[in-house]
Every structure is written in C-alpha cells, then in structure tokens.
C-alpha cells in the first residue's frame, strides 16, 4: 500500500478537520482526527491515508493542499511511505499513533538495520499494540527530512502511555538510539510523537 501521514499545526482544529475530511472524501482508508493531549511535536490534527497505488494520491494531494492553504495552518509535517500494517485483519484498538524520526544520514546501513530490528521487536513484547507498521519514508516535508515512520494501533490511551512507553524493552533497547548520552545515538532531530482516537 501507499501511505500518507500528515501532522497539521493549527488553532482552528474543527475547521481543518472538516476541510480535510471533505478533501479526502471517497478515500476508503482515511483517518482524520484531532490529536490527543500529550503529543510531542505532533500537531493538532493527524491525518492518515492509505491507497492501493501511488497513482491514486496526486489528485487527492491537490485537494489536501488546498484545504491546508489557510492562514489558520501554521505548519505541516508529512511523510509518504509504502507497506501494510502487521496484525490481524480486524486489529481493533481505540488509539492510532505515528512517530516521525530522522536517522543521521551518515549512519552505516548495518546500524540502521539493527535500529529497525529493535523497533520491530517492540510489538512482540507490548500486548497493548494491536497492529503496527515500520516504514522508510519516500517523501518528507516539514521541519526535518524524516527517514522513518513507526505507526501503531493501541488498545487504548493507557496502553500507549503506560505499557508501551514504560516497558523495559523500550528503555533498555530502543531508547539508546534516541539518547544523546548513548554511544548508539543515531536519531538526531526532535521526533514527532502524535496520536489520536480511532473511530468506533
């Protein structure tokens, strides 16, 4: 699948959500919702779109750009990428989370592979993750040249803020890639940690 995830910074949430929903009308896999309290650099509105083919995106892209071309939108971070979520056909969950990050460009390929393997191992240990996807970014816009997007569905908000972020595998294996005090540190820029409620 071809995917687009966008984080919109705005003080006019309701208007932007309505405009984006109108712009993507007809896209079968579309999530547009206000972000929940606790996001970090994650915007005020989160949009995730999934297409069977990247040829379906340009026309929708033009409508999305038009919806976002308002002074009420102060910043947009967006990534396009490919892949499908890992998990059951009906993963359930009530919270969608997206993490944008940038690995330093001089990082050796084998180190990037180990980093990706550590991220991909998280769902095996965190039972509150109902589906997940780790992808390399094809096109990035915003405050950084994002290289990866890591998205998950969680059972609920507590499953994200508790068992996931506080799990030993997180701080023992994954956090070292993000911590400037660790030798393995490769994620150089501030990440975008964004999440929103999934429709019932």
Image: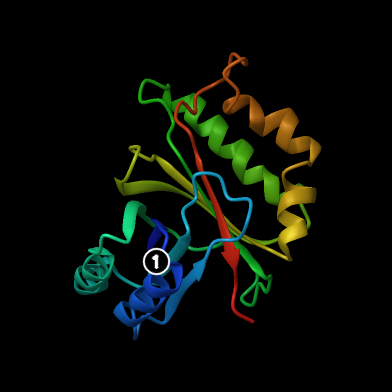
Label tally: 1
- Kindly state the secondary structure of the residue where label 1 is placed: loop
Quarter of the view holding residue 174: top right
Report which quarter residue 177 is drawn in. top right
Q: Which one is in front, 13 or 129?
A: 13
Q: Report if residue 7 is visible in the image.
A: no
Q: How is the image coloured?
A: rainbow
Identify the residue shown where x is 69% and y is 30%: 173
Q: Can you say which quadrant of the picture contains the C terminus?
A: bottom right
Q: Residues within 10 Å of mark 1 (few under 14, many from 20)?
A: few
Do we see residue 16 in this rendering?
A: yes
For the view shown, which residue lies furthest in the bottom direction?
26
Q: Quadrant of residue 145?
A: top left
Which residue was labeled with disc 1?
1
Q: Is residue 168 left or right of residue 57?
A: right
Report the front residue among 19 and 157: 19
Q: Position of residue 60 (x, y in %)?
A: 25, 73
Q: Nearer the viewer, residue 88 or 12?
A: 12
Is 160 displayed left or right of 84 in the figure? Answer: right
User: Could you tell whether 141 is left or right of 9 in the image?
Assistant: left
Whole-percent x and y of residue 66?
21, 69
**Can you say which quadrant of the picture contains the N terminus?**
bottom left
Q: Residue at x 69, y 45 (%)?
A: 122
Name above or below for residue 6 compared with residue 139.
Answer: below
User: Whole-percent x and y of residue 78?
Assistant: 35, 53
Q: Residue 163 in the image: x percent, y percent?
A: 79, 49
Residue that appears at 34% across and 86% down: 26
């Amino acid at each position: 699948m071809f995917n687009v995830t966008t984080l919109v910074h705005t003080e006019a949430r309701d208007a932007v959500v309505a405009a984006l929903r109108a712009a993507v009308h007809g896209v079968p896999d579309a999530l547009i919702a206000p972000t929940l309290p606790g996001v970090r650099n994650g915007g005020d509105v989160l949009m995730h779109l999934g297409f069977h083919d990247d040829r379906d995106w340009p026309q929708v892209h033009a409508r999305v750009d038009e919806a976002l071309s308002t002074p009420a939108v102060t910043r947009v971070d967006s990534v396009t990428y490919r892949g499908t979520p890992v998990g059951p056909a009906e993963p359930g969950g009530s919270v969608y989370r997206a993490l944008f990050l940038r690995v330093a460009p001089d990082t050796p390929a084998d180190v990037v592979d180990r980093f990706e393997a550590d991220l991909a191992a998280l769902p095996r240990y965190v039972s509150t993750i109902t589906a997940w996807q780790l992808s390399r970014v094809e096109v990035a816009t915003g405050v950084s040249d994002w290289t990866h997007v890591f998205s998950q569905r969680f059972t609920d908000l507590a499953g994200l803020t508790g068992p996931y972020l506080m799990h030993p595998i997180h701080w023992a294996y994954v956090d070292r890639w993000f911590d400037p005090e660790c030798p393995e540190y490769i994620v150089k820029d501030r990440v975008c940690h964004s999440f929103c409620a999934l429709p019932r």
